Amino acid sequence: MPRTLRLFTVLVVCMVWAGTVHASEVSSALVRAASLARSGSISAAVRILPKPEAVTIADVEPARRAASAIRKDRPDLALRLALRCAELDPEDRDALWLAGDIWRKHPEVDGFTPAQAARLPGKASLFETNSSTGVPRASIWTIAVNEPVAATDSRSGTPLDRLTLVYVEQNGVMRIRFQIRHDAATDADLAQRMGRIAGLVAEASDRLLKYTNRARYPVAVRLSRSGTAGAEQWANAITFGRVDVPRTPLEWARQMAHEWGHASLAGLTGYTEPEAWTNGDTGERVYLSTLHDWGWLRDWDPSIDAKAYLDSRVLAPVRRWAQTGPVPALVRSRGADGYEHAVGAALYVRAVYGPWILARTLDRMRGNRLEGFLESLKAVLVETPNAVAMRPKDITGPVPICIPTEGLHTLEGRNVRVNGRSVSRPVTLKAGWPRVDWQGEMKIRRMADGSRRVP
């Protein structure tokens, strides 16, 4: 049966089933929207445009025309409409061509389902984490675009004409995270592999930082065979140089997490070494340790052994901070010792108060110095009366905790001791970092006076 006749037959069947031979309300709205768009009234067209999921087989033709009419101004809606048409009629070559053309020209567009993504002109691959650790599963999609996409690295001038897109699946919908460009077809496997670790790092940061995440999706990632064997973040792009030079899986992951720290976190700056900003190192250590704890690092590459890295780069700075708390000379230092003290402060806050308190502290601090970070922590704790202090991992004895304001406090936990003395009732604490010993978790609440707690 000819395609046109087949569509006509399906259309008639649908209308008979509906008990009417009149155009559906959806089709009528699509026709009006297309007419408005062609006359330049894009806003008015979008206001009356039906949702793609409301489109049925009877609405395919007007839906495709509406998608074509709005594609220039609203490629996001146009792509979803075109994909819906192709989903309803897999043999609709016009809809398939339209969806593919919009997607190639606007790779930043997302919001479609994995089933719809299978109709795009690219090679799709799904990577999922193991949920046995109790952490909700992460689903990372990579789609390698079939045809070369002309592009050049603006900084090096290197041609980067291959494109792999990275999505995170959320509630059955694909959300764009990265656009990976590379300059050799032979690096397609590396692009897929780096897309997966990039997607995992981004998903971890979204879950940890929530609305404080400073990254702007999609982020450009460039895999270049020129330059030096390293990585750098600039504006909304991350560039890996000399990708033909071998790295261990842990080093690839470390470089990605480091540059993602620069992209996603507020940071401290003004340091002379090892680099000016601390957010790269902070993000690297927070994200890699999180991926390790959630089992995602081994899901990505079972050969990775991160124990030595975590001991020296994460646990050791936390132990140092547990021994000293904020050291005035190191807080002021702009050298390597001050830099490491600042990174250690962030890691310690994350270890004791959790990643959300760290994220809020970084997000609301004034200035970019450690002094501002510590003041911001006080403000966040004042605003979070239900904050819980966790015992830092593998550390025994008393450790410093932040008391924002002087006053009467209750410390609710097991075997609580303040400055060596057992505490079982409210105690007056000065603002600062007293040393407290406890087991497990401890709730710290400041009371308004001797008999009433602050709400």
Image: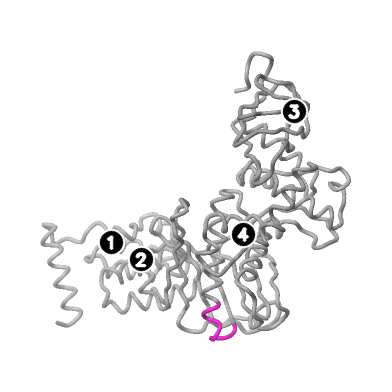
The secondary element bearing badge 3 is classed as loop
Inter-mark Cα distance, 3 to 4? 34 Å
Report how far apart the C-alphas of labels 1 and 3 lie in the structure: 59 Å
Instruction: Give the quarter of the figure containing the N terminus.
Output: bottom left
205 relative to 137 in the view: left or right: right
Q: What stretch of residues is rendered in magenta?
A: 183-190
Task: Name the residue: 83% across, 56% down.
Answer: 270
Give the labeled residue for mark 3. Answer: 405
Tag 3: residue type?
Thr
Q: Residues within 10 Å of mark 2 (few under 14, many from 20)?
A: many
Residue highlighted by disc 1: 55
Q: Is residue 222 magenta?
A: no
Q: Earlier in the sequence, mark 2 or mark 3?
A: 2
Which one is closest to the eye, mark 3 or mark 4?
A: 4
94 over 397 or under it: above or below: below
| Sooner in the amino-acid sequence: mark 3 or mark 4 | 4
Question: Along the line of sight, which residue is nearer the eye, 152 or 81?
Answer: 152
Inter-mark Cα distance, 2 to 3: 56 Å
Q: Quadrant of the C terminus?
A: top right
Callout in the foreground (4, 1):
4
Q: Earlier in the sequence, mark 4 or mark 1?
A: 1
Q: Residue 166's spot in the image, x, y percent?
A: 50, 68
Q: Position of residue 252 (x, y in %)?
A: 62, 71
Q: Residue furthest top?
A: 451
Q: Is disc 3 surrounded by few (<14), some (14 to 19) or many (20+) residues within 10 Å?
A: some
Return the residue at label 2: 81
Q: Which residue is under mark 4? A: 288
Tell me the CA gap for discs 1 and 2.
Answer: 8 Å
Magenta stretch encompasses residue 188: yes
